[in-house]
């Protein structure tokens, strides 16, 4: 199963659209996971139409229309792995301990908000993934997104992709 992980797209404020490379990944993915900050519902409509399957939540920059269509927390089981998608996880300091405590029944937590890519595994085995942003790099050298695979219930080939802007 091919996964595409996105967050903090901020369309149309930070970009008019997703980069073509990201749309190519949407076409290849079995599941797109989006960790919020869509900003406007048009991208949600387009991604819903083009993705084979979309698992998504809203973020702090999303207004009432997006919030009315998405949960604050999205939970899904994919090939036996329990995923949770949220926007915010708080400060970097203590994140692994807090998330292990707050999400004891999750195998993979996909989050956003910071625009800073993150990939760690906590002492309890919880995998924390932040794909960064494909449209707004902020202090990062590149805009980013992630891809991954699930093979027989195991998360594999997690790759952070850099976009040239």
Image (tube, helix red, strand yellow):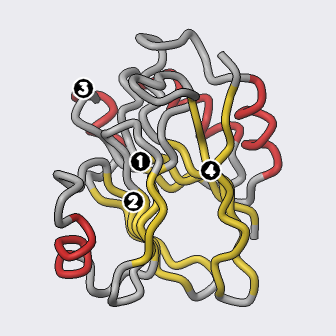
Q: For mark 4, give the secondary structure.
A: strand
Q: In this view, does 22 lie to the left or right of 81?
A: right
Name the residue rendered at 68%, 63% in the picture: 148
Q: Compared to 20, does 70 lie above or below?
A: below
Task: Find disc 3 in the rendering and name its residue.
Answer: 63
- Residue 35: mark: 1
Label 2 vs label 3: CA separation? 18 Å
| First reached walking from the N terminus: tag 1 or tag 4 | 1
Spot occupied by residue 30 in the image (x, y as percentages of width and height) = 73, 60
Q: Compared to 74, does 57 lie above or below?
A: above
Task: Find disc 2 in the rendering and name its residue.
Answer: 85
| First reached walking from the N terminus: tag 2 or tag 4 | 2
| First reached walking from the N terminus: tag 2 or tag 3 | 3
Are the residues at dot 2 and dot 4 in contact (C-beta closer than 8 Å)? Answer: no
In the picture, the quarter occupied by the C terminus is top right
Q: For mark 2, give the secondary structure.
A: strand
């Amino acid at each position: 199963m091919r996964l595409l992980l996105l967050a903090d797209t901020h369309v149309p404020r930070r970009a008019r659209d997703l980069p073509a490379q990201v749309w190519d990944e949407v076409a290849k993915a079995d599941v797109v996971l989006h960790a919020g900050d869509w900003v406007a519902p048009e991208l949600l409509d387009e991604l819903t139409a083009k993705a084979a399957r979309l698992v998504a939540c809203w973020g702090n920059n999303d207004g009432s229309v997006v919030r009315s269509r998405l949960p604050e927390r999205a939970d899904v089981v994919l090939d036996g792995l329990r995923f949770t998608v949220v926007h915010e996880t708080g400060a970097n300091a203590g994140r692994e301990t807090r998330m292990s405590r707050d999400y004891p029944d999750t195998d993979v937590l996909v989050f956003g908000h910071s625009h800073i890519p993150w990939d760690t595994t906590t002492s309890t085995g919880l995998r924390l993934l932040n794909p960064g942003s494909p449209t707004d790099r902020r202090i990062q050298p590149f805009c980013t997104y992630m891809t991954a695979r699930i093979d027989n219930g195991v998360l594999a080939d997690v790759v952070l992709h850099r976009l040239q802007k």
